[in-house]
Image (cartoon, helix red, strand yellow):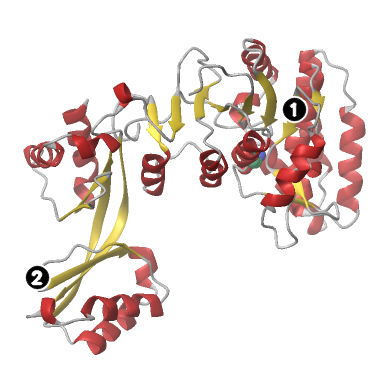
């Protein structure tokens, strides 16, 4: 990270803004560093497990309105949530006027995306009034094409124009607009993306993403008790772990920051002193580890193909992969031997066309043996430091063997960024715990 940080974009997620107390915590965090100047907010999230996110309430309002149902009680609950926050923060804000505009919108020809966007809009209005920072409507600077895809070029031009001379601002996350003013939203969790785009558009030194966990964990806390947080992770490692389901950030939030070389720091609003996880291109030398994180997924199948002299048959692999392509299937891993080839793929995706795929492989390559094994889990052990550490694979394999687990598949690419293991689904948790304990 840069030594001199003068401009930080912060994004606060829904759990960080679920009530007035959380707004106050966010404001304390912002005031603690004068570089924290551009704030992106989510809509208020759940206050407890039984609660409902504002965004979900807005979607429900829309559904009722288009089905001719009565949405007034639901809209009243939304008004009370925001009015309660405004009252406790002691800010002067016309929440009733804003809700009246939304009510009138619902009585006309409502737009689902416009409705969903109102949570972030109102949240930003409140935060801007509370902080005394300028409110900048995302509809003015996050530009979507009519097909709903972000227009990156137009967005960065708009950010430069709208934000010129603005040194402190609150911007609602999750939505933007087409040039004709039609409001569009990103997919769920999209405020992360707004934060990353704003960080890039403002050429910020850092993008802080404030949430309710102290960063990414080295393993899934549902599998490993109190896993250690990851202090530094590279974008490539993050992508590997996120692909396996371990993520604290919307996938599309990584690219704008990565392309601009802006580090992302995942922080915990409820524990602001925790350093969290820094996602960056280059990990500081002292923080490079053989294993940064472990993640995995259940629900894989392996198609095993055997044929004598397979290795001499040029085009064999291509023909098999062509069958998968013809059926719209993407494969995960492709471990192979001299006369064997295994294709690992998602069981759910395969199930819709299983017999046809096997029949087509038979027709394409006339294998001696062709069978499918279900019930596999894949575990990725990811670490950029692996490449310069001898014995990482040995340690992983010994740890798994000592846990009495049979490894069904093992894959390490020459990039040495990760080692992938396939095990029976019933061994999934034991394997992750064994590897975690070996390296921590
Ligand atoms: N409020 C939206 C959602 O619940 C967007 C976000 O929070 O990032 O998905």
Q: Residue furthest bottom?
A: 363
Inspect this view and state whether residue 163 appears.
Answer: yes
Q: Which residue is the site of mark 1? A: 170
Please state the quadrant of the image where ligand 1 appears: top right
x 12%, y 41%: residue = 400
Q: Earlier in the sequence, mark 1 or mark 2?
A: 1
x 51%, y 46%: residue = 251
Specify few, some or many for label 2: CA neighbours under 10 Å numbering under 14, 14-19, or 20 or more: few
Q: For residue 5, what is the image quadrant?
A: top right
x 65%, y 49%: residue = 186
Tell how many labels: 2
In the depicted view, which residue is nearer to us: 22 or 281? Answer: 281
Q: For residue 352, what is the image quadrant?
A: bottom left
Q: Which residue is the site of mark 2? A: 338
| Tag in front: 1 or 2 | 2
Inspect this view and state whether residue 116 appears.
Answer: no
Percent x, y of residue 404: 8, 42
In the depicted view, which residue is nearer to us: 110 or 203? Answer: 203
Specify few, some or many for label 1: CA neighbours under 10 Å numbering under 14, 14-19, or 20 or more: many
Percent x, y of residue 267: 51, 23
Q: In screen coordinates, is 229 left or right of 56?
A: left
Compared to 320, does 191 lie above or below? above
Compared to 180, does 197 lie above or below? above
Q: In screen coordinates, is 179 left or right of 264?
A: right
Q: For residue 354, what is the image quadrant?
A: bottom left
x 20%, y 29%: residue = 439
Percent x, y of residue 141: 77, 42
In the depicted view, which residue is nearer to us: 35 or 211? Answer: 35
What whole-number distance in Å separates the C-alpha atoms at marks 1 and 2?
Answer: 60 Å
Percent x, y of residue 287: 32, 24
């Amino acid at each position: 990270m840069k030594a001199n940080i003068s401009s930080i974009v912060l994004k606060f997620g829904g759990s960080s803004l679920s009530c007035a107390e959380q707004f106050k915590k966010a404001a304390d965090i912002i005031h603690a560093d004068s570089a924290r100047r551009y704030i992106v907010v989510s809509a208020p999230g759940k206050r407890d497990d039984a609660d409902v996110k504002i965004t979900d309430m807005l979607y429900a309002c829309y559904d009722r309105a288009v089905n001719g149902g009565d949405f007034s009680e639901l809209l009243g609950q939304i008004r009370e949530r925001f009015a309660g926050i405004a009252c406790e923060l002691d800010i002067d804000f016309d929440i009733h006027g804003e809700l009246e505009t939304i009510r009138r919108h619902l009585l006309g020809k409502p737009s689902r995306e416009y409705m969903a966007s109102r949570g972030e809009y109102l949240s930003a209005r409140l935060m801007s009034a509370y902080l005394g920072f300028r409110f900048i409507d995302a509809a003015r600077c996050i530009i979507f094409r009519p097909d709903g895809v972000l227009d990156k070029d137009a967005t960065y031009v708009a950010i430069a124009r709208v934000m010129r001379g603005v040194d402190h601002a609150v911007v609602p996350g999750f939505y933007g607009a087409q040039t004709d003013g039609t409001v569009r939203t990103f997919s769920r969790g999209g405020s992360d993306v707004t934060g990353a785009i704003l960080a890039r558009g403002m050429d910020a030194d850092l993008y802080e993403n404030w949430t309710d966990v102290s960063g990414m964990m080295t393993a899934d806390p549902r599998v490993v008790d109190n896993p250690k947080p990851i202090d530094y992770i590279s974008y490539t490692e993050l992508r590997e772990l996120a692909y396996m389901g371990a993520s604290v950030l919307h996938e599309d939030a990584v690219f704008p920051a990565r392309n601009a070389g802006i580090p992302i720091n995942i922080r915990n609003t409820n524990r602001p002193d925790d350093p969290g996880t820094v996602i960056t291109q280059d990990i500081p030398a002292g923080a490079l580890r053989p294993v940064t994180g472990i993640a995995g997924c259940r629900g894989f199948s392996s198609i095993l193909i055997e044929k004598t002299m397979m290795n001499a048959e040029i085009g064999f692999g291509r023909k098999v992969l062509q069958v998968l392509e013809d059926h719209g299937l993407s494969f995960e891993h492709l471990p192979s031997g001299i006369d064997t080839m295994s294709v690992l793929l998602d069981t759910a995706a395969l199930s819709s066309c299983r017999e046809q795929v096997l029949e087509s492989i038979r027709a394409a390559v006339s294998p001696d043996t062709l069978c499918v094994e279900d019930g596999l889990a894949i575990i990725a052990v990811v670490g950029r430091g692996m490449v310069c550490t001898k014995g990482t694979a040995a340690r992983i394999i010994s740890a798994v063997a000592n846990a009495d687990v049979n490894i069904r598949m093992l894959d390490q690419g020459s990039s040495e960024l990760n080692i992938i293991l396939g095990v029976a689904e019933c061994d999934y948790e034991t394997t992750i715990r064994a590897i975690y304990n070996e390296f921590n």
